[in-house]
Image: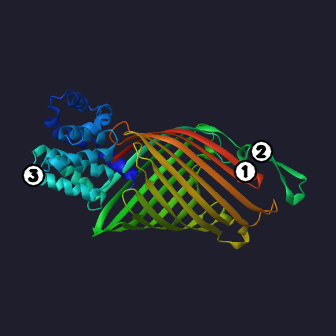
Amino acid sequence: MTNGKAMLYKAAMHGVAGALLLLSGNAVWAEDGTLLSRAGSLIAARDYAAAYALLEPVESENSGNPDYDMLLGLAAIDSGHVTRGVFALERVLAVQPDNSHARAQIARAYFLLGEQEAARTEFRNVLNQRPPEDMTRIINRYMSAIDKAQGLATTFSAYLEGTVGHDSNVNSATGVSSVAVPLFGGQIIIDLDRTARETSDNYMNLAGGVSFRTPLANRLTLFAGINASQRLNNHEDEFEIGMLDANVGLSYRKNRDTFTLAAQGTHLSLDNRTYRRAHGINAQWQRDINNKNQLNAFAQVSRLEYPDNEIRDADRYVAGGGWAHVFNGDLTPLLFVSGYLGKEETRDRQWDFLSNRLYGIRSGGQLTLKPKLVAFTTMGYEYRTHDGQEPLFLKDRIDRQLDVSLGLRYLPGYNWVIKPQLTYIRNESNIDLNDFDRYMVSVSVRREFNW
């Protein structure tokens, strides 16, 4: 499982984890040792980072003391050092195999790491020891969450998101005020009107969506979802973009492999008028090599329709693959990289200069700065070559587009996400009219719902 999914489960079960922590910690916090008493007090106050900072430097001297290892495990898990917490709790269980508190905590750690089967086994071991009713209820909630994560139960999710920001180029237009047209010997200079030149504006974006997953048979899951968004510019109303997207598909999981096939449709509007419709099929294979490495391959076929500009109607084909890896370390670094190639071909071949071949690469990563704060970055580069000469500019168009994003994700509370982000786009083209750059700075607030 990817680190991103593990973080999602951690956020979803935050309240449950706190209750289980209180139930499992009482027997240890009563110790008389000064170090353990101070650490226990910090954990009771939920200052897990301070408790970990107190305990970790003396691990070599105290390793093997089950009271110390128990406290270190608790502090490590809830300060983001989950793997270190597992090691400490394993030492507890090595000398106290019937310690239900340690076993419950190591099960929770496996859950946060995405090792669902290991978590399920340990939770069952705790239930077999007939723990108190409160702990039984909490563990059953974890077991239910694992069932949902593995597609063994029907799940529903939804979100609402609001964004405010500034866009330096809302119409992705060139920064020049005029262009020379070679068709007329380069002697004709065309002045561009305001709508064809780079225009900046502040904006607000509203978005929301709902989705569900339900098991149809052993390993086979049906899923569907719908998402909508609307951008509202402060001044430039004619460049306001709306989007409605719907998908439905099947997912089949066998051992480490997941196969997905989905139909998708998208409606894009510009200034409240239909700009483009697209519908197609997406297929993907994903292999979880282990809890730190994941591979995938994908293919997409779609039809693009432009009601007000039919010469751009096209069929688009894209295929590619990628790899993701979670590194060891306190910041839990995550890296992903993918590559793809494709073709967009106009349906009317007399407009073949609008067809293009594309080649791209995307990469990104994240660092968990604190349990509730993640820094992330993404970068993409796409090279596009068009099939025929532009009639006005008498050359085959070539575009090289770079986009880079930097941001933070902060989880202030249950199912809330705050995301400041900076994005830069540079499209370098051999035709001045298509050459532009653009940056956007924004802050999003998102509320997620899961049931």
Which of label 2 and label 3 is nearer to you? 3
Amino acid type at circle 3 is Gln
Left or right for 97, reference 192? left
Q: Earlier in the sequence, mark 2 or mark 1?
A: 2
Q: Which mark is residue 435?
A: 1
Task: Please say whether residue 404 is visible from this viewpoint.
Answer: yes
* Residue at image coords 12%, 49%: 98
Per the rendering, the mark at residue 176 is 2
For the residues labelled 2 and 1, the Cα–Cα distance comes to: 9 Å
Q: Secondary structure at mark 3?
A: loop
Local packing at callout 1 (Cα closer than 10 Å; few below 14, some 14-19, many 20+) is: some
In this rendering, position of residue 188 left or right of residue 431: right
Q: Amino acid at mark 2?
A: Val
Residue at 58 percent across and 47 percent down: it is 404
Q: Residues within 10 Å of mark 3 (few under 14, many from 20)?
A: few
Q: Alpha carbon of mark 1 to alpha carbon of mark 3: how far?
A: 68 Å
Q: Can you tell which quarter of the image residue 317 is in?
A: bottom right
Identified by mark 1, the residue type is Asp
Residue 175 image position (x, y, % from top left): 74, 44
* Residue 248 % position (x, y): 41, 64
Q: Are discs 2 and 1 less than 8 Å apart at CB?
A: yes
Say how the picture is coloured.
rainbow
Question: Which residue lies under the disc numbered 3?
Answer: 129
Mark 2 and mark 3 in contact? Answer it, CB < 8 Å. Answer: no
Q: Secondary structure at mark 2?
A: loop
Nearer-N-terminus badge (1/3): 3
As drawn, is 282 to the left or to the right of 343? Answer: left
235 on left or right of 81: right
Give the foreground label among 1 and 3.
Answer: 3
Q: Is residue 451 visible?
A: no
